[in-house]
Image (cartoon, rainbow, N blue to C red):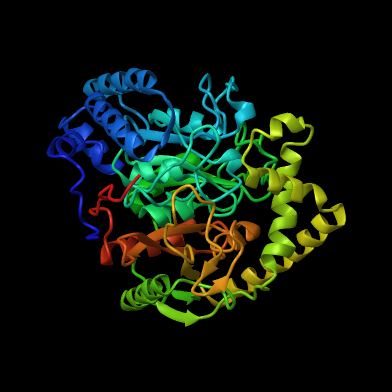
């Protein structure tokens, strides 16, 4: 498929979606010039969301009337010259794991289908204060336990590039909506890759910030994957995502791991990569990887070298048993704890794979969890050592491109057997274990026209380094002007 194809959009769709496809930075500029208003934009975004939702299933709960009210207020503020906030009038969707006051937050769980939080998450309050217009809650799997956005409540979320493929997840509705032009920005969460995997599969830019930089409370349903879970932004452009992260980052004492960092800008670092030392690894020394993903990654490494970066074949020491001996004892135990005390009859309403994760988590002993925690500290030490030698690390984001919609994963890559749940994402969850910032940048397409992502990892609290590399790569190999075609059978 031609990556630029969009034949399935009617001319009316294209015309109606013109404002919905604009970057946040362009919307703000247009508001300031009087070219259009937030009310006009929100109507376009709502129309686009309805089209994309009908094809891909990305919306759990519409917030359209709230959005219209907020957009009218923003329109008046821009007209009166009183608009404040860096996202004034900009549409933003919110993943259903994140609390929005008086809006259902089922988190993909049948037992939570009637739960309505009484307060906003800290980041939602921050977005409102910055003038953002919240449009809807987007799809996720139950409790964010897997890397697709399918759940017993919302069904299957599909990839706008090919409807027979998954969007990835668990922030799949967020990434698919942005990729398809239904608004410029989305809130995602990431415990094992749930921002970066769907960003890779859907061809958008998403970042998982340093653990604790963005507060999660109240909401996000800790302790589910509690020591691994991050919140971050997804968008089409590097500048948009940096703008949103500046709003989301901040200290909140309700989150025990929230970092007391002062406000800062994330795009102040120059995007000249001359002399920047970037380690690269196509496989972390052990991981199976699809040949087309490897090829796209190698091309991206050449591109970065052409931008002046010093590319160094280097990586942290990662043991091949990391999934079974570190991630699962920690993540599965935390997931089991999150549903502790839930009646078995209620748990039976969940997907069999989710129940299996919970049952596995119940089997691990406290000593297993602590042994995994000690080994996790050694992994963190290995990354610390790497960042004494280099400024950043790049890998593929995911070892494969988007697989069949409605499935949990693949069990083989290039003839090598892998864990069906998490084995095909070997580059994402080690970064969660270390708490490092990492982003996924679109870097190409496979022979089926499906996007491929490049993961950029930086030292703790060095998000500006990621944005500098991403901005330089974006200029050399732009992606934001490519739109999905909604091809393939649903």
Residue 158 figure quarter: top left
Please tell me whether residue 232 is drawn above or below residue 478 in the rendered image.
above
- Tell me where residue 382 appears, x and y as whole percent: 66, 72
Please tell me whether residue 124 is drawn above or below residue 469 in the rendered image.
above
Please tell me whether residue 141 is drawn above or below residue 302 in the rendered image.
above
Please tell me whether residue 456 is drawn above or below residue 56 in the rendered image.
below
Residue that appears at 37% across and 52% down: 202
- Tell me where residue 99 appears, x and y as whole percent: 55, 29
Residue 223 figure quarter: top right
Count of numbered labels shown in the rendering: 0
199 relative position to 100: left or right: left
Q: Which residue is more in the foreground, 225 or 431? A: 225
For the N terminus, the quadrant is bottom left
Extreme residue in the front direction: 489
Residue 46 visible in the snapshot: yes
- Tell me where residue 211 appears, x and y as whole percent: 60, 51
Residue 376 visible in the snapshot: no
Q: Which residue is more in the foreground, 481 or 312? A: 481
76 relative position to 293: left or right: left
- Tell me where residue 348 appears, x and y as whole percent: 69, 35
Q: Which residue is more in the foreground, 197 or 162? A: 162
Residue that appears at 61% across and 41% down: 351
Extreme residue in the bottom direction: 313
Residue that appears at 63% across and 69% down: 384
For the C terminus, the quadrant is top left
Residue that appears at 74% across and 64% down: 325
Residue 54 figure quarter: top left
């Amino acid at each position: 498929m031609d990556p630029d194809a969009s034949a399935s959009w009617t001319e009316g769709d294209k015309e109606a979606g013109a404002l919905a496809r604009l970057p946040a930075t362009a919307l703000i500029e247009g508001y300031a010039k009087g070219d259009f208003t937030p009310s006009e934009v929100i109507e376009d975004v709502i129309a686009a969301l309805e089209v994309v939702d009908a094809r891909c299933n990305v919306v759990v709960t519409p917030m359209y009337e709230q959005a219209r009210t907020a957009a009218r207020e923003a329109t008046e503020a821009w007209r009166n010259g009183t608009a404040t906030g860096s996202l004034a009038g900009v549409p933003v969707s919110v993943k259903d794991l994140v609390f929005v006051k008086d809006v259902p937050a089922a988190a993909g769980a049948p037992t939570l289908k009637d739960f309505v939080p009484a307060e906003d998450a800290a980041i939602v309050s921050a977005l409102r204060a910055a003038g953002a217009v919240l449009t809807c809650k987007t799809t996720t799997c139950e409790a964010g336990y897997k890397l697709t956005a399918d759940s017993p409540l919302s069904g299957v979320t599909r990839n706008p590039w090919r409807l027979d493929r998954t969007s990835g997840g668990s922030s799949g509705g967020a990434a698919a909506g942005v990729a398809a032009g239904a608004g410029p920005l989305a809130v995602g969460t990431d415990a094992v890759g749930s921002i970066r995997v769907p960003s890779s599969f859907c061809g958008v830019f998403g970042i998982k910030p340093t653990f604790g930089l963005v507060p999660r409370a109240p909401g996000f349903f800790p302790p589910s994957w509690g020591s691994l879970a991050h919140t971050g932004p997804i968008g089409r452009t590097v500048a948009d995502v940096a703008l949103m992260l500046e709003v989301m980052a901040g200290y909140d004492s309700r989150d025990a791991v929230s970092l007391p960092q002062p406000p800062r800008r994330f795009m102040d670092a120059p995007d000249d990569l001359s002399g920047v030392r970037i380690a690269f690894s196509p496989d972390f020394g052990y991981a199976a990887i699809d040949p087309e993903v490897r090829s796209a990654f190698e091309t991206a490494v050449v591109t970065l070298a052409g931008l002046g970066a010093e590319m160094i074949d280097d990586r942290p020491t990662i043991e091949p048993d990391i999934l079974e001996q570190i991630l699962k004892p920690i993540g599965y135990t935390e997931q089991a704890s999150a549903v502790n005390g839930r009646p078995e009859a209620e748990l039976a309403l969940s997907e069999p794979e989710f129940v299996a994760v919970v049952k596995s988590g119940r089997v691990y002993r406290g000593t297993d969890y602590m042994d995994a925690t000690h080994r996790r500290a050694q992994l963190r030490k290995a990354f610390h050592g790497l960042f004494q030698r280099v400024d950043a690390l790049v890998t593929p984001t995911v070892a494969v491109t988007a697989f069949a919609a409605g499935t949990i994963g693949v069990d083989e890559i290039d003839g090598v057997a892998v864990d069906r749940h998490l084995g095909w994402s070997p580059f994402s969850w080690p970064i969660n274990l270390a708490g490092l910032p990492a982003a996924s940048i679109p870097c190409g397409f496979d022979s089926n026209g499906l996007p491929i992502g490049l993961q950029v990892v930086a030292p703790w609290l060095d998000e500006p380094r990621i944005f500098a590399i991403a901005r330089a790569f974006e200029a050399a190999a732009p992606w934001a002007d490519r739109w999905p075609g909604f091809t393939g059978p649903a």
